Amino acid sequence: MSNTPQIEAFPSVDAWAEATAARLGETLAAAVRDNGSAFFAGPGGSTPAPVYRHLAAMDLDWAKIAVTLVDERYVPETSSDSNARLIRDVLLQDKAAAGRFIPLFTPEVTVDRAAIVAAKALAEAGGRFDAVLLGMGEDGHICSMFPESPTLKTLLTPTLKPTVLGVPHGRDGMAPSIERLSINLPYLMQAERVILGLKGETKRRVFEEQAKGDPKIQPIAALIAADVSLEVLWTEEG
Ligand SMILES: O=C(O)[C@H](O)[C@@H](O)[C@H](O)[C@H](O)COP(=O)(O)O
């Protein structure tokens, strides 16, 4: 029986960011110690920057750590929408400047071709994440697993191989507003540690509601049904 993970509450954004970064860093350090290298995947959006600042300052063996994204807008790094830009500007600084970044975006003919290129690049980098940080939208999406998206069911299918898929922009004003690239649920299922970082009361409520949802179409329910080793760290400060 899958159980909803307990939400761990922190009194401030900084306490929340520090605790999240410490756990991610602990897992990355253990992977470097035990396997000689480590692989981290994180989100874009407005939530993770404080976590990335704390992580960048951690004294890890960053030259042995690969860094990628759990999803990406299908835009070049020159775009302010680029998640790769966030990773380069905030995470791959300070001590983490030596980390090796593996972007998901490449200027291919179509987003689906770019997804094939990204899937190959992640597989060549080891194909399994040691530590993953996830954000969540107020619609319950994680990665680029959006409600009503035609790719959602495939992204949430637990029996497929870990891969990257192209996500079309939403029709009739539905999210996402631009094409995306996203890892699928199996990538999260095989990760050593997955932390969902949430800020604000709305997202806490959405998480609790979505946890009771249909794992075929609701990502949080899919994570829980797939027994992903999920830790949920939350702070009320928005
Ligand atoms: O490309 C993105 O936008 C992110 O990778 C996405 O998966 C994010 O985690 C959620 O959309 C939450 O976004 P916020 O943190 O901005 O609420």
Image (spheres, grey):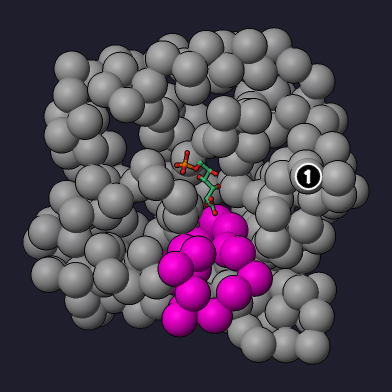
Q: Residue at x 80, y 20 (%)?
A: 214
Relative depth, front residue between 222 and 193 = 222
Q: Is residue 114 visible?
A: yes
User: Residue 24 appears at what percent x and percent y?
Assistant: 30, 46
Label 1 crowding class (10 Å Cα cut-off): few <14, some 14-19, many 20+?
A: few
> Ligand 1 near label 1 (Cβ, under 8 Å)?
no
Viewer-proximal residue, 29 or 52?
52
Q: In which quarter of the image is residue 218?
A: top right
Instruction: Report the quarter where the N terminus lies.
Output: top right
Q: Is residue 102 above or below residue 148?
A: below
* Residue 193, percent from left and from top: 44, 42
In this rendering, does residue 120 appear at all? no
Q: Which residue is drawn at 48% across and 17% down?
A: 202
Q: Give the magenta-colored segment's residue range.
A: 67-84
Asked if the magenta segment contains residue 76, the reply would be yes
Q: Is residue 210 magenta?
A: no
| Position in image of residue 229 (x %, y %) | 51, 32
17 is higher (above) or lower (below) than 205: below
Left or right: residue 155 compared with residue 95? right
Q: What residue type is labelled 1?
A: Gly
**Quick check: 36 above or below 137?**
below
108 lies left or right of 59: right
Q: In which quarter of the image is the C terminus?
A: top left
- Circle 1 — which element? loop
Picture residue at 13% right of the left edge, 57% below the top: 58
**Residue pointed to by mark 1:** 173
